[in-house]
Amino acid sequence: MPGTGPLPMTFQSATAAYLGGIRSAWTSVFLLVMAGTYIGLGALAHDFGLSALWLMLSTLFVWAAPAQVILISGIGTGAALLEVALAVTLSGIRLFPMVVALLPLVRDRDTRLRDLLLPTHFTSVSMWVESLRILPQLAAEHRLAFCNGLSTGYMGAAVIFGFVGYYLAAGLPPLLAATLLFLTPLSFLISTARNARIMMDKLALGLGLSLGALLTVMNVQFDLMWAGVGGGTLAYAIHRVREAMA
């Protein structure tokens, strides 16, 4: 989804690129999604009796709203820490393909391994979608700084709106809080559908949604993982068969 306002195609320095990334985050439509999601997340943390400081630290270190929902609800209901850690880890696996797709865009011949640690940690749905849209327009030497700035802008917004939701929790209806948490997966679905330009991408999206609904009705464990793996594999297989027949 495009941000509001024109974005410069060149920057004079890495610092300017970093600040440009922050500006892009705060003028992006994803900021509205971030606001709604973390207001709901802040209310959830408050209802489970967790502190505002704990919420902020979980945002900085976990940095993924679905994983934070699992973390907060697991700890809040007294689940074993090992079970919570395993659930958060499995939730984070979905970000691995995003990291694999993003890193070739931000690295060049002079990029050191340690320089890639921040963008790897920073990878989230909103940052990934915006990076794939914007980074190809930028000079290679400024992409890493811009990407880090974009992520810093989103993370800062998440912390701020998390505090807002935490202190508004007393007057926030549970249904509204749950609805706000749904904004992130909904925005990701819309953005993915919008960016699916080739038939294989559209087919993978359609098969994943269909399999996900079917597996949920059948009460299959790890339905999200199986839907993603199954839908993507089927789409790739159909694509290869079509190419062979062409």
Image (cartoon, helix red, strand yellow):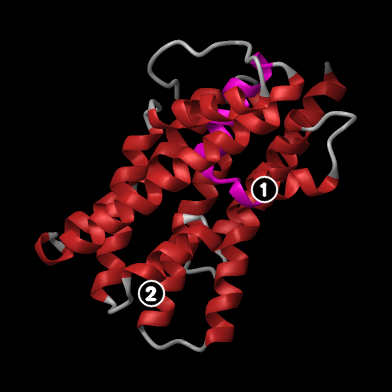
What type is the residue that disc 2 sits on?
Ser
Q: Position of residue 92 (x, y in %)?
A: 60, 59
Specify whether residue 43 is painted magenta.
no
Image side of residue 46 versus residue 134, left or right: left
Image side of residue 150 versus residue 184, left or right: right
Q: Relative to 205, say whether 20 is above or below.
A: above
| Residue 237 visible here | yes
Magenta stretch, residue numbers: 121-138
Res. 69 image quadrant: bottom left
- Which label was assigned to residue 73? 2
> Secondary structure under badge 1?
helix
Main SS, magenta residues? helix
User: Which quadrant, please, contains the N terminus?
Assistant: top left
Q: Nearer the viewer, residue 76 or 148?
A: 148
Q: Residues within 10 Å of mark 1 (few under 14, many from 20)?
A: few
Q: Relative to 10, say whether 135 is above or below.
A: below
Res. 237 image quadrant: top right
Q: Position of residue 198 (x, y in %)?
A: 65, 21
| Residue 202 visible here | no
What type is the residue that disc 1 sits on?
Leu
Q: Position of residue 213 (x, y in %)?
A: 45, 53
- Which label was assigned to residue 18? none
Query: Residue pushed farthest right?
Result: 109
> In percent of the image, x 13 and y 61: which residue is there?
173
> Secondary structure under badge 2?
helix
> In percent of the image, x 58 and y 30: which residue is there?
18
Specify whether residue 137 is painted magenta.
yes
The residue labelled by disc 1 is 118
